[in-house]
Image: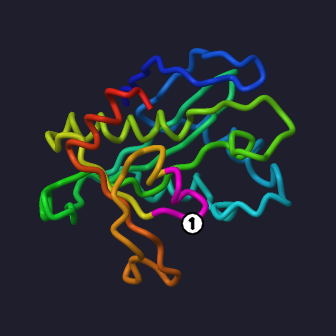
């Protein structure tokens, strides 16, 4: 298995400066170990909506399946974010309805990187780096930057305001608890990448 690494940058909150990080195009065993050792139960009072996620199970479930890919961000010697994407979904926005896009199945920053959760060094921009990776994968697949995802309520504002995605409303067909579906058009992807969000 060939793993590609890319240099990216995160904002070190404590030092108030950009620091170099590494984006991997595959979640490795050490990333899963970081999740199990450091992420689980990090802040039990924070009530994070994805607290129940088990990244090892998610990565094992997609192993060997065409159309799926995983990503990880490392900084400061630790895993700072994880993502799984699916490249065989179709768009819903009127201008791209039925066209292929990259669907973000799961994306999560390490709990200490969430606003309002302290206790250790933290970085801003993990989610942005991972969304940019999904857009780049969309470009690489020939989908021109089109991406889509269902958002947990705590992240709605991030996708709508920080990422500039279109909110297509609550989707009751997705899960027992309806989640809002967001989609990014080719033009929105271009703006996102140009602004270096």
Residue under label 1? 153
Instruction: Check if residue 154 falls in the magenta segment.
Output: yes
Q: Quadrant of the N terminus?
A: top left
The image quarter containing residue 144 is top left
Q: Is residue 134 left or right of residue 145?
A: right
Q: Is residue 28 above or below residue 86?
A: above
For the rendered model, the colour scheme is: rainbow
Q: Is residue 2 above or below residue 187?
A: above
Q: Which residues are magenta?
A: 151-158
Task: Tell me where residue 93 appears, x and y as whole percent.
Answer: 21, 62
Instruction: Check if residue 140 falls in the magenta segment.
Output: no
Disc 1 element = helix
The image quarter containing residue 15 is top right
Task: Tell me where residue 29 appears, x and y as whole percent.
Answer: 58, 38
At 53% across and 20% down in the image, what residue appears? 9
Residue nearest the viewer, comparing 32 with 17: 17
At 56% across and 35% down in the image, what residue appears? 126
Q: Quadrant of the C terminus?
A: top left
Task: Tell me where residue 80 appears, x and y as whole percent.
Answer: 63, 35
The image quarter containing residue 120 is top right
Task: Tell me where residue 35 appears, x and y as whole percent.
Answer: 68, 44
């Amino acid at each position: 298995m060939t793993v590609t690494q890319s240099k990216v940058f995160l904002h070190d909150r404590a030092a108030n400066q950009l620091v170099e990080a590494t984006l991997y195009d595959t979640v490795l065993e050490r990333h899963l170990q970081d999740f199990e050792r450091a992420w689980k139960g990090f802040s039990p009072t924070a009530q994070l909506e994805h607290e129940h996620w088990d990244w090892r199970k998610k990565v094992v479930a997609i192993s060997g399946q065409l159309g799926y890919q995983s990503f990880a961000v490392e900084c400061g010697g630790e895993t700072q974010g994880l993502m799984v994407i699916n490249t065989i979904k179709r768009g819903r926005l009127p201008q791209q309805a039925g066209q292929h896009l990259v669907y973000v199945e799961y994306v999560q920053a390490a709990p200490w990187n969430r606003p309002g959760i302290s206790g250790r060094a933290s970085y801003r921009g993990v989610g942005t780096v991972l969304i940019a990776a999904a857009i780049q994968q969309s470009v690489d697949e020939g989908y021109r930057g089109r991406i889509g995802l269902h958002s947990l309520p705590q992240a709605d504002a991030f996708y709508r305001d920080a990422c500039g995605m279109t909110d297509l409303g609550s989707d009751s067909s997705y899960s027992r608890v309806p989640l809002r579906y967001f989609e990014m058009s080719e033009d929105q992807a271009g703006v996102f990448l140009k602004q270096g969000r």
